[in-house]
Image: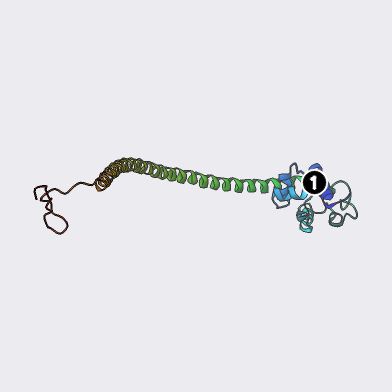
Amino acid sequence: MNTKQDRLLKVYEYVRAHCGVHTKSEFAIRLHMTQPALSAAMNGKEAYLTQNLFQKICAAFPGVFNLDYLLTGQGELLLASDSPEPSTAKDSASVDIDFYHKALDNYSKMIADLRKDIEYYQQLVLDKDSILMENNEQVVSMRTQVVKLETELEHIKTTLAAVRKNYDQQVDTIKLLQAALAQYKGDKYPYSPGVADGNNEHVHIATDGE
């Protein structure tokens, strides 16, 4: 097969052999693109195998690759022959020097960005420590409140138990009084002399002599 992925891989093999490119990272730098994007293209993801990618290849290695072949698969990979032209070979040293200067600049920028990231994460750590201290203080305060509430709860439970006991005693007393009252109402006692009846009149009990 001669897919876009296949043609890109052929380009990569060629630049490694003839153009002083040794890794995918170096290849990506020469093409002015990120390594993840280049890796995606080399893995066959169509969204990255664009005309712009192959134009970048021809621009990065002028006079070497056949753009029509890269886009359509028609023709040959190289414009002239399977090896670089003499002028290209003569200029390979200067090309490599330019490449490494650009690589050095890129890595310097990457290092600067990494330092900024390190400072950012260090600040996050400091902020995290501060937040943890505040949270610890809040936890201690909450624990103190919990202990206080537990003590109050125990006091309430004790009070409720005492109230319940007193209530039960009063209920027992009421039951005893009700029983006594019921017994009193059930017995028929004779009226004694001098005991007032319901009309406030004294009741006279007759004797045998009357």
Q: Residue 92 or 74: which is nearer the viewer?
A: 74
Amino acid marked by disc 1: Tyr
User: Which residue lies most toward the right here?
Assistant: 75
Look at the image and name its color scheme. Answer: rainbow
> Does 40 sit above or below residue 155?
below
Q: Is residue 207 shown left or right of residue 37? A: left
Residue bearing mark 1:
12
Q: Residue 139 or 53: which is nearer the viewer?
A: 139
The image quarter containing residue 47 is bottom right
The image quarter containing residue 177 is top left
> Does 132 sit above or below residue 80?
above
Q: Residue 33 or 47: which is nearer the viewer?
A: 47
Secondary element type, mark 1 = helix
Q: Is residue 152 shown left or right of residue 196? A: right
Q: Residue 193 or 93: which is nearer the viewer?
A: 193
The residue drawn where x is 27% and y is 42% is 176
Q: Position of residue 153 (x, y in %)?
A: 34, 43
The residue drawn where x is 11% and y is 52% is 204
User: Which residue lies most toward the front here?
Assistant: 209
Q: Position of residue 74 (x, y in %)?
A: 90, 55
Number of labels in the image equals 1
Q: Position of residue 54 (x, y in %)?
A: 79, 55
Q: Position of residue 71 (x, y in %)?
A: 84, 56
Q: Residues within 10 Å of mark 1 (few under 14, many from 20)?
A: some
